[in-house]
Image: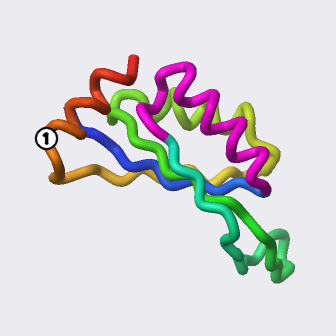
C-alpha cells in the first residue's frame, strides 16, 4: 500500500477547516494540516489574480485519492479546486502504518 501526501488550497481558513474535518471524520485522510496566510498569484479566466489562501496537506492511502478528491470537489467553493497527490516514498514506519490504520 502506498501512502500519499495531498496538497490542496482553500479560499479561507474556515473553508479549509470544514474540508479537513470532513476528510478526517470520513476516514478519507488520517490527518490534515492547515497552513494559513499563503498568498497565491495565478491567472484565471485570462486575468492575473492575487489572493490569500490556506494550504491543506492531507495524509492518506493511494486507493483513497479518487474518493478524497471527489469529496473535496463537493465541499469546495472553487470551480477548479487544487488537489494534487504525491507519493510518500519513505519515512517513519510507525507513522506510515498509522495512516493505514486511520483511513477506511
Rendered location of residue 9, percent (x, y): 64, 57
In the picture provided, is 36 more to the left or to the right than 49? left
Is residue 40 placed above or below 98 in the rendered structure?
below
Q: Which residue is drawn at 72% across and 36% down?
A: 18
Q: Mark 1 points at which residue?
A: 93
Pick the quarter of the image with the N terminus: top left
Is residue 95 placed above or below 6 in the rendered structure?
above
Rendered location of residue 77, percent (x, y): 81, 45
Q: Which residue is drawn at 71% across and 76% down?
A: 39
Q: Which residue is drawn at 29% across and 50% down?
A: 87
Q: Which residue is drawn at 51% across and 42% down?
A: 32
Colour scheme shown: rainbow
On whether residue 27 falls in the magenta region, the answer is yes
Is residue 93 placed above or below 64 in the rendered structure?
below
Rendered location of residue 24, percent (x, y): 53, 28
Rendered location of residue 27, percent (x, y): 47, 22
Q: Quadrant of residue 45?
A: bottom right
Give the secondary structure at mark 1. Answer: helix
Pick the quarter of the image with the C terminus: top left
On whether residue 60 falls in the magenta region, the answer is no
Count neighbours of disc 1 (C-alpha within 10 A) and say few if under 14, some if 14 to 19, many if 20 or more. few
Instruction: Identify which residue, 35 or 75, lies in the foreground.
Output: 35
In the picture provided, is 54 more to the left or to the right than 5? right
Which stretch did the figure color magenta? Answer: 12-31
* Number of numbered discs overlaid on the protein picture: 1
Our reading of the magenta stretch's main secondary structure is helix
Q: Quadrant of residue 69?
A: top right
In the picture provided, is 94 more to the left or to the right than 75? left
Is residue 54 placed above or below 6 in the rendered structure?
below
Amino acid at each position: 500500500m502506498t501512502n500519499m501526501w495531498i496538497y490542496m488550497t482553500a479560499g479561507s481558513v474556515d473553508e479549509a477547516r470544514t474540508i479537513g474535518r470532513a476528510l478526517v471524520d470520513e476516514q478519507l485522510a488520517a490527518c490534515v494540516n492547515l497552513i494559513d496566510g499563503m498568498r497565491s498569484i495565478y491567472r484565471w479566466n485570462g486575468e492575473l489574480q492575487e489572493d490569500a489562501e490556506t494550504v491543506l496537506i492531507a495524509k492518506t492511502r493511494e486507493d483513497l485519492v479518487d474518493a478524497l478528491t471527489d469529496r473535496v470537489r463537493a465541499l469546495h467553493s472553487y470551480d477548479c479546486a487544487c488537489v494534487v497527490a504525491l507519493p510518500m516514498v519513505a519515512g517513519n514506519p510507525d507513522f506510515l502504518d498509522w495512516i493505514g490504520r486511520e483511513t477506511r
